[in-house]
Image (cartoon, rainbow, N blue to C red):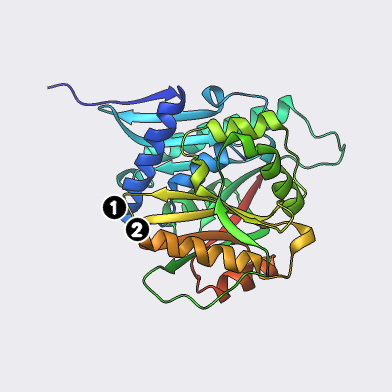
């Protein structure tokens, strides 16, 4: 009898996005969600997050399989100078896990060497996130000389069976789902107004056409004049009955009106009606506004994520 081998291959397109999302959902179900990003976060990070990337996902995402089943994957985040590594619970701390780390580091190092920082005194650093309590990853990081960068994030959850507080919108404002590509310019405007980010119409349409995105999962608060005042994109994991908010934003011209709280409460009520059990949202620990909003909505920290860095 021939022993099964683990085979590595390149990402091959949208079908693989679905496959790695399903893999993450199953792994989270098997071993709790410790160390696993939400399936929706995969689509968000590789779509929205990589919209300015110069290299295609077919060159920056690697998949490992055994008997046709995905057992791990790594994504090079290019201009973030970091990588994402997700591995089946049975292979944590294994030679496969170590091999995947080697690949991720090599890809980021090559990108940095080929795209040097224009600042002459800029240090060369690889970034990798650590879920606090994930022992196998922590051990590899210690062996390789990683140290905290100073940034931390909170992975927070909210039980949708618990009651929601009473919230209301200012007069003339309303909440609805986005309708599709015909609203892309208005969606871009609220994204830019919320975060100061840069978007082109082509980039946003590409995200909307990507796997996992559904217009009805992008919710907006509409101002009396018709412009979008706040928004959130949500992502469903049907296996674990969870839904992720990513991102959540309020246009700078409409902040401090309670729009974010009203929007998220409305969407969580919709989640519960759909049979989902848990809402999830991440936030930077250096953002007191987000920390306060999510706490007021009943979110509690489940995991602390530490951004780690390695100089080379």
In the rendered structure, the answer to whether residue 282 lies left or right of residue 211 reads right
Q: Report the front residue among 240 and 99.
A: 240
Q: Which mark is residue 41?
A: none
- Per the image, label 1 sits on a secondary structure element best described as helix
Q: Quadrant of the C terminus?
A: top right
x, y percent for residue 264:
55, 63
Q: Residue at x 67, y 28 (%)?
A: 202
| Residue 210 appears in the rendering | yes
Q: Residue at x 44, y 55 (%)?
A: 243
- The residue tagged 1 is 30
The residue most toward the right is 120
x, y percent for residue 40:
47, 46
The residue most toward the left is 1
Look at the picture and state if 229 lies above or below 140: below
Circle 1 crowding by C-alpha within 10 Å: few under 14, some 14–19, many from 20:
few
In the rendered structure, the answer to whether residue 3 lies left or right of residue 119 reads left
- The residue tagged 2 is 32
x, y percent for residue 232:
58, 53
């Amino acid at each position: 009898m021939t022993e099964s081998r683990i085979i590595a291959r390149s990402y091959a397109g949208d079908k693989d996005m679905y496959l790695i999302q399903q893999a993450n959902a199953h792994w989270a179900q098997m071993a709790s969600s410790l160390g696993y990003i939400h399936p929706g976060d995969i689509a968000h990070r590789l779509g929205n997050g990589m919209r300015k990337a110069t290299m295609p996902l077919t060159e920056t995402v690697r998949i490992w399989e055994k008997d046709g089943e995905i057992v791990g994957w790594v994504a090079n985040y290019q201009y973030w100078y970091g990588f994402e590594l997700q591995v089946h619970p049975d292979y944590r701390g294994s030679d496969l896990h170590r091999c995947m780390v080697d690949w991720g580091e090599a890809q980021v190092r090559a990108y940095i060497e080929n795209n040097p920082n224009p600042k002459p005194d800029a240090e060369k650093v690889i970034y990798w996130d650590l879920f606090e309590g994930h022992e196998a990853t922590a051990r590899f990081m210690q062996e390789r000389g990683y140290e905290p960068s100073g940034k931390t994030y909170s992975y927070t959850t909210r039980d949708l069976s618990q009651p929601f507080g009473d919230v209301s919108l200012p007069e003339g404002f309303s909440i609805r789902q986005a309708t599709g590509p015909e609203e892309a310019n208005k969606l871009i405007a609220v994204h830019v107004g919320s975060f100061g980010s840069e978007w082109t119409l082509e980039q946003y349409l590409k995200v909307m056409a990507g796997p996992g995105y559904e217009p009805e999962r992008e919710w907006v608060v509409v101002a009396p004049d018709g412009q979008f005042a706040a928004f959130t994109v949500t992502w469903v994991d049907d296996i674990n009955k969870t839904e992720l908010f990513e991102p959540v934003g309020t246009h700078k011209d409409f902040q401090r009106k309670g729009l974010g709280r009203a929007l998220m409460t409305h969407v969580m009520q919709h989640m519960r009606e759909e049979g989902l059990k848990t809402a999830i949202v991440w936030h930077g620990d250096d953002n007191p506004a987000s920390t306060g909003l999510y706490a007021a909505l009943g979110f509690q920290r489940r995991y602390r994520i530490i951004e780690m860095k390695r100089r080379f």
